[in-house]
Amino acid sequence: MRIKVLGCSGAEFPGYSHPGFLLDEEILFDAGSLTNVLDEKSQLKIKNIFITHAHLDHIKGIPFFADNIIVKNKMHRVGIISIPPVLRTIKKNLFNSDIWPDFTIIPDPENSILNFLPVKHGKTLRLNSYSVTPIKVNHTVPAVGYLVEDKRERRFFYSGDTGPTDLTWKSIGDIQIHCLIIEVSFPNSMREIAINTGHLTAKLMKDELKKICKLPQKIYITHPKPQYSKLIKRELKLLKLRNLKMLKDREIITV
Ligand SMILES: [Zn+2]
Ligand SMILES: [Zn+2]
């Protein structure tokens, strides 16, 4: 599997984009970055977007993507996939004809640009040659991570935003994750804030790794606050984990 990191930052500044992970050019995980990174041709290859939760930094690419579609490629259709409360929040607060046109009924309700497709915790969805399973995580709003497996049984798990959790790792059980993309948003000194806002520090992340039955072969860190990224990088280094790396915007990782 080939994943292009469109963005992997926990805040937006020039050179730092919000999360978006593009699998094989067609399936996007979170849409914090999309139209700000991909040209028109690449945008129109995207057919499905899995959303971890409804926070703006994970969804803000969707409205501009829908707008680009209606302006020039009216026939393109996109599935927006998540658990029902996430879809409800996006529909009610974003595609409500006030903040943005309701692309779930444009050009007409039977054939809309965006199709909201609900999925359930723990229920695997087959898409192209992949199996994708939403797994509950611990955030301040309803949120899931996604476990993705290809035909060769290679797997990655993308946590989205999460604080400390036992349930997530119990749900994954003893299967081998080859690549873990997990968040670390704050430096160790901001532990309280991290816990209260459903996020991790480097130390908290290390505690999470201890709960995973089979240690992932590769661990990639996403969602650091750019204001603290140098400090977070130093703190991650101190964990002395050989297979751990902080992600960079626009890099490509293989699973
Ligand atoms: Zn969030
Ligand atoms: Zn976030």
Image (cartoon, helix red, strand yellow):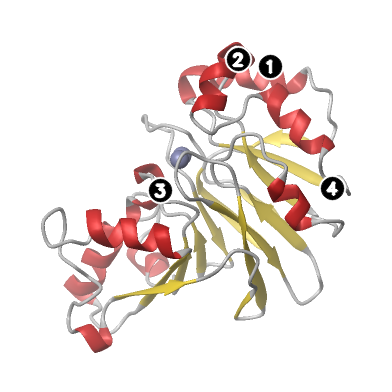
- For marks 4 and 3 on the same chain, the one whose residue lies earlier in the sequence: 3
Q: Quadrant of the C terminus?
A: bottom right
Three-letter amino acid code at the position of disc 4:
Gln
What residue does disc 2 label? 231
- For marks 3 and 1 on the same chain, the one whose residue lies earlier in the sequence: 3
- For marks 4 and 1 on the same chain, the one whose residue lies earlier in the sequence: 4
Q: Quadrant of the N terminus?
A: bottom right
Task: Check contact, mark 2 vs mark 1: CB within 8 A.
Answer: yes
Front in this rendered view, residue 86 or 41: 86
Three-letter amino acid code at the position of disc 2:
Leu
- For marks 2 and 4 on the same chain, the one whose residue lies earlier in the sequence: 4
On the picture, is 177 further left or further right than 46? Answer: right
Give the alpha-carbon distance from disc 4 to disc 3, as whole Å: 26 Å
On the picture, is 207 further left or further right than 125? Answer: right
What residue does disc 4 label? 217
Mark 1, secondary structure of its residue: helix
Residue sitting at x 16%, y 58% = 100
Residue sitting at x 55%, y 24% = 194
Q: State ligand 1's quadrant.
A: top left
Q: Is mark 1 within 8 Å of ligand 2?
A: no
Above or below, comparing residue 233 to residue 153 in the picture: above
Mark 3, secondary structure of its residue: loop
Res. 234 mark:
1
Q: Is mark 3 within 8 Å of ligand 2?
A: yes
- For marks 3 and 2 on the same chain, the one whose residue lies earlier in the sequence: 3
Q: Position of residue 159 (x, y in %)?
A: 62, 47
Give the alpha-carbon distance from disc 3 to disc 2, as whole Å: 23 Å
What residue does disc 3 label? 32
Above or below, comparing residue 167 to residue 234 in the picture: below
Give the alpha-carbon distance from disc 2 to disc 4, as whole Å: 24 Å
Task: Check contact, mark 3 vs mark 1: CB within 8 A.
Answer: no
